[in-house]
Amino acid sequence: MNQLVFLSLAPVVLLIAIGFVAGRAGWIRAGAIKDLSNLVFLLLTPALLFRTMSRVRVEQLDFKPVAAYFLAVMMLFGATLLVQGFNRRAAVLALATTFSNTVMIGIALVGLMYGAPGLVTLFTLVSVHSLVLLTSATVVLELAVAQEQKPGSSDEASAAAPRHALATVLMAVKNAILHPVPLPIIAGLLFAQTGLVIPAVIDKPLELLANAFGPLALVLVGVTLANTPVGRHWHQALVLASVKNLLHPLLVFGLCRLLGVTGLPMTVMVVAAALPIGANVFLFSQRYQVAEELVTASVAVSTALALLSLTLVLLLVGHAV
């Protein structure tokens, strides 16, 4: 297992390092990151997700591991709100401790380690990951904004016109579904149920695009790290990253054992929980104008820490299986 961990993580580390060096050297400028991100998320990601799920029958999917995963998420999210208080900052930090980078790093890592069976398990989680977490976070944040609204407030986010709760939920659900991650998963699953096969003339380009996803996504992570300042928030960022990278997977591991989830499904769920903080958390901090510098630093620290924490987690689940 130790050799498998090393052989699987080594390409991930090297590709991120290559991206980091390219970013530091100025070969890929900060202004190009958005374009590269669009290439990965809007073209390569849908190709990989649709092609993989187009071969999966619904009866092959197991949602029990996903239930264990989200039970841990609920516990961690709720505990963060209890400790930090019910406000916008607490909601964003709670999202940071629970929202994993399941796409850019997760798919590449699980694909390298466990192949198609592991990806099917991960995609079962990914299909509802953003929908559940981003929708829930939006509702909590909107409720926090409503609670913070006071006459004469100078805070733009707090002083904004009240939003109807139902409209907020519906908009959040719509945005979470019409997204380049869940949409191709759903489309691929629907196609698979027809019993049809993707024609070779279409499947081959999809395969080439899908194969390009892993290396380009990991290089992009390195480039982003090279252009992300940590600064004075490194201590708080390290605390958040430790909760996300270590406590989250330990909770998932314990709940999987408690619920009888073992083998590959448990391994993939624990690895998913050990992944670093996803970039969507930063988008939320921007949208609600709270803890932006801290979240940016936390994403960077969490990604760097993942090189160590993922190794520890993979060794843990390897001995437990």
Image (spheres, helix red, strand yellow):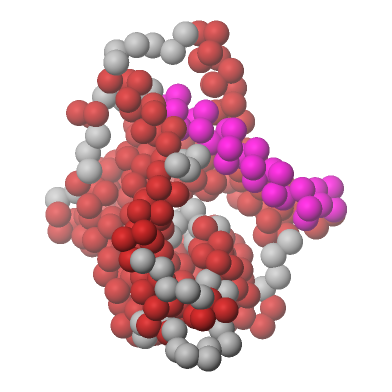
What residue appears at the point 28 percent right and 57 percent down from the top-left corner? 70
Count numbered badges in the picture.
0
Residue 214 x/y as whole percent: 57, 37
Residue at the far top in the pictured view:
200
Q: Nearer the viewer, residue 196 or 211?
A: 196
Name above or below for residue 287 compared with residue 294. Answer: above
What residue appears at the point 20 percent right and 28 percent down from the top-left corner? 59
Residue at the far right in the pictured view:
26
What residue appears at the point 51 percent right and 33 percent down from the top-left corner? 46
Residue 41 x/y as whole percent: 57, 41
Q: Can residue 98 be seen?
A: no
Q: Which range of residues does the magenta coloring cover?
A: 26-52
Is residue 31 highlighted in magenta? Answer: yes
> Position of 170 compared to 297: left or right?
left
Q: Nearer the viewer, residue 145 or 219?
A: 145
Name above or below for residue 39 compared with residue 69. Answer: above
Q: Can residue 34 be seen?
A: yes
What residue appears at the point 80 percent right and 57 percent down from the top-left corner? 24
Residue 232 x/y as whole percent: 66, 83
Name above or below for residue 39 compared with residue 65. Answer: above
Q: Quadrant of the N terminus?
A: top left
Tell me which corner region of the image, top left, top right, bottom left or bottom right, holds residue 74: bottom left
Residue at the far bottom in the pictured view:
152
> Position of 37 compared to 25: left or right?
left
Is residue 8 highlighted in magenta? Answer: no
> Position of 134 compared to 67: left or right?
right
Residue 101 x/y as whole percent: 49, 53
Q: Nearer the viewer, residue 119 or 321?
A: 119
